[in-house]
Amino acid sequence: MNSLGLSLIFKMGCICAKEIITVNGRKYTVLEHLGEGGFSTVSLVEDNLTHKKYAMKKIVCHSLEDQRLAVKEIEYHSIIKHPNVIELIDSAYQGTADPVVNATSEVLLVLPYYHKGTLANELERRHKTHDYMKAVDIINIFLQICEGVKAFHEAKPEPLAHRDLKTANIVMGDGMKPVIMDLGGSVTPARVKVCGNQAAQSLQELAAERCSMPYRAPELFNVESYCMVDERTDIWSLGCILYAMCYFKSPFDTVYERGDSVALAVISANITFSENSPYNEDMQNLILSMLKVNPMERPYIYSVIESSHEVLSRYEGRV
């Protein structure tokens, strides 16, 4: 997958020269180069006036299509305003007013900087010592992630799907508050009517480029020629995220790391649970309810939230 994913915001890199970047008259000093991928780079910057730290994403556009995607990312930030979805602090476009197709331009996005890193970072730390989270904490964090996803699915004028939900695309704020990030290339209108082989192939190739394999829904691995793909691609990803919160990795991460066929593993959906973990059948059944190969059998986000509350109340009742 050729996507920066804003998770690179949180990887430590080399110290850069004291470059100054101006966004809408506000000056930021570059403190550190954090990462890059595709045509994007992310830097840790400091506001020269307030001395507050931010993550600045620079998207280099080599074509009108690149520019369209960058502008869409800004647009999605304006549509989706939710405490559990990353906020766009400021943005600027640097280029000619009427660029030709091959002209290079830049789009700058100023985003919050989360020093605690991502949920993936948290799970990696815990995995080293098999430090399982309490079931109640897992469900409370998961419910907040679901509320963020609901904001995408309720977007106007049409529902949106994130399509690349994963532990590396969730940053952790104060009080273990999860925040969904990366509203770049993967975010799309949720409901897509596929008519014909060419449309199916295009969607499949797009998913291969922009949706991480261990969290990608089965219907995006092998897109049927005549079908409807909807926001329940995100529900599959949520099932993988909840599994990872319990067992440190997506159910398909090991397959991916071995170099075996993730597509085959996903389509067969052979989900196994560790016998040594402290989670009972309530948690496992909640996970399995989302990991249905047939998307029509998967719940919508409202049912996931309702079921999660029920599981939470049962766990709290045992405390």
Image (cartoon, grey):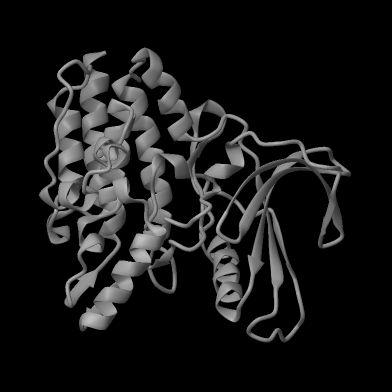
Which quadrant is home to the C terminus? top left
| Residue farthest to the front, as pictured | 259
Q: Give how far across and how far down residue 160 sits, in percent.
A: 40, 65
Horizontally, is 281 left or right of 214 in the view? left
Q: Residue at x 29, y 68 (%)?
A: 204
Query: Split into 4 quadrants, where in the image is the N terminus?
Result: bottom left
Answer with left or right where residue 139 lies relative to residue 101. left
On the image, the x and y values in percent for residue 35 come to 62, 45
Q: Nearer the viewer, residue 237 or 318?
A: 237
Residue 239 appears in view: yes
**291 over 24 or under it: above or below:** above
- Left or right: residue 313 versus residue 182 is left
Q: Position of residue 184 (x, y in %)?
A: 52, 60
Picture residue at 51% right of the left edge, 49% below the top: 181
Q: Is any part of residue 190 visible from this angle?
A: no
In the picture shown, does residue 258 fall above or below 267?
above
The residue at 21%/40% (across/down) is 307
Percent from the top left, x then y, of residue 302?
27, 51
- How many numbered discs? 0
What's the residue at 48%, 63% (across, down)?
Answer: 185
Quarter assignment of residue 130: top left
Residue 310 horizontal side relative to residue 183, left or right: left
